[in-house]
């Protein structure tokens, strides 16, 4: 990651989080009627610490991997999720307050605020539970000219595991066992296997090498493998025997499997050159493994049959899905068909796109209004 960009990002994160916690502090003191100077001072200190703890914990785990760093980051990332819901609760409380002023309505605001903050807390608890409730999503896909061998066969697509200090080796074992229980013919690991923090990379990848898939296991990078030097992540995966596809095409019994680097494929011209150079056979079915669902039209024009993506987490938390829908032009989640040339969702076209909501989480270990998933692709 560019050092200048990192500094800018840290300053921006500090600014947003400090402003958000100031707003929370003002809401709590105003609507709970707190006036005791000693209590208010203690709250200022607590909210001040909480406003910076996530950024500090995030920087810490870039360099340290021990019990204290993990504990600090798990607490900080969890608090970030709760703080988000408390922030939404605060906005709602102020809106209700404004309405009561306009219409001269008398309400017991300590009670109202307590109720709304209580619901926000429950939303956070639900998010933690839901993030651990991994579902299996089955999609049926019809590919043109599919060889007889692949008919009625299955592939597993799993992305966005973010293994590191929140989701650890035990999590990796659980995911690998879940995949093996699906008995796939081929497995695709779609980037962000790692969270990009200090971790035992080889150990985290080993459980996936034990998956018995007849036609192999393939890996592509995500943005979290490319915050800095991606080499350690790629080498850790290669050491397990998993095949890394770095802007490559392999033909597996008549099915073309294409894997592209995340950073390279997020530049339109570079992505175009990569696909052009791979000489994709448009008379044979092909699957493009691409972490981020950008430039769908480039894949469509290259003759790709099916694109599998991730990255978006479908927003991960309540309301964020509307941002991902706008950024990725409707290709942020689910099974879609890309039309040419305007690529309207649902328009007839050859390219089928599936974007997964991902298996786990980044930042807050929560999911609200979205489900974590492993995807089973059934070829017809």
Image: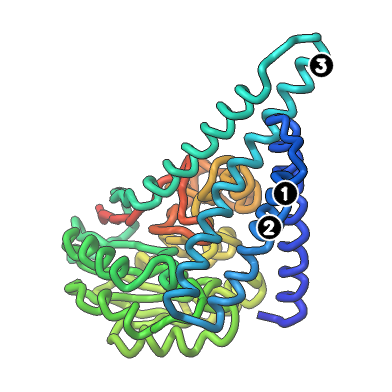
Q: Secondary structure at mark 3?
A: helix
Mark with earlier residue (3, 2): 2
Query: How many residues crowd mark 2 within 10 Å: few (<14), some (14–19), many (20+)?
Result: many
- Can the viewer see residue 17? no
Instruction: Give the structural element (helix, strand or loop) at label 1.
Output: helix
CA gap, disc 2 and disc 1: 8 Å
Q: Which residue is mark 2?
A: 51
Horizontally, is 75 left or right of 241 in the view?
right
The residue wearing badge 3 is: 101
Q: Position of residue 45 (x, y in %)?
A: 70, 56
- Relative to 122, say whether 47 is above or below: below
The relative height of residue 93 versus residue 152 in the rendered view (above or below) is above
Q: CA distance from mark 3 to mark 2?
A: 31 Å
Gap in Å between the C-alphas at discs 1 and 3?
A: 24 Å
Question: Residue 20 bears which disc, if any?
Answer: 1
Q: Are marks 3 and 2 in contact (CB under 8 Å)?
A: no
- Give the residue displayed 28% in from the left and 86% down from the top: 241
- Count of marks overlaid on the render: 3
Q: Is 222 or 127 nearer to us in this picture?
A: 127
Image position, residue 209 (x, y; %): 25, 79
Marks 1 and 2: in contact by CB < 8 Å? yes
């Amino acid at each position: 990651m560019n050092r200048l960009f990192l500094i800018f990002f840290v300053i921006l994160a500090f600014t947003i989080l400090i402003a958000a916690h100031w707003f929370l502090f003002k809401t709590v003191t105003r609507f709970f009627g707190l006036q005791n100077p000693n209590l208010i001072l203690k709250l200022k200190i607590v909210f001040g610490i909480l406003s910076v703890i996530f950024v500090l914990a995030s920087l810490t785990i870039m360099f340290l991997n021990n019990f204290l760093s993990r504990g600090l980051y798990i607490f900080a990332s969890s608090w970030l999720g709760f703080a988000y819901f408390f922030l939404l609760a605060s906005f709602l409380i102020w809106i209700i307050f404004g309405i009561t002023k306009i219409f001269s309505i008398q309400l017991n605001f300590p009670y109202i605020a307590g109720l709304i903050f209580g619901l926000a807390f429950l939303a956070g608890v639900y998010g933690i539970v839901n993030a651990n409730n991994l579902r299996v999503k089955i999609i049926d896909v019809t590919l043109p000219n599919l060889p007889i061998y692949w008919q009625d066969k299955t592939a597993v697509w799993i992305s966005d595991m973010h293994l590191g200090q929140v989701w650890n080796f035990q999590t990796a074992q659980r995911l690998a066992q879940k995949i093996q229980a699906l008995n796939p013919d081929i497995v695709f690991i779609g980037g962000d296997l790692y969270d990009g923090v200090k971790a035992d990379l080889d150990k985290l990848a080993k459980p996936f090498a034990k998956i018995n898939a007849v036609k192999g296991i393939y890996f592509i990078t995500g943005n979290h493998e490319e915050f800095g030097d991606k080499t350690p992540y790629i080498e850790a995966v290669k050491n397990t025997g998993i095949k890394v596809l770095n802007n490559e095409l392999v033909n597996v019994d008549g099915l073309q499997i294409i894997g592209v680097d995340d950073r390279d494929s997020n530049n339109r011209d570079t992505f175009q050159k990569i696909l052009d150079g791979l000489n994709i056979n448009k008379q044979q079915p092909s699957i493009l493994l691409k972490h981020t669902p950008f430039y769908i039209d480039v894949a469509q024009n290259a003759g790709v049959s099916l694109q599998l993506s991730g990255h978006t987490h479908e927003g991960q938390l309540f309301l964020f899905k509307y941002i991902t829908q706008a950024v990725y032009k409707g290709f942020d989640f689910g099974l879609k068909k890309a039309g040419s040339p305007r690529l309207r969702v649902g328009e007839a076209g050859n390219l089928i796109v599936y974007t997964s909501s991902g298996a786990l989480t980044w930042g807050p270990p929560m999911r609200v209004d979205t489900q974590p998933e492993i995807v089973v692709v059934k070829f017809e």
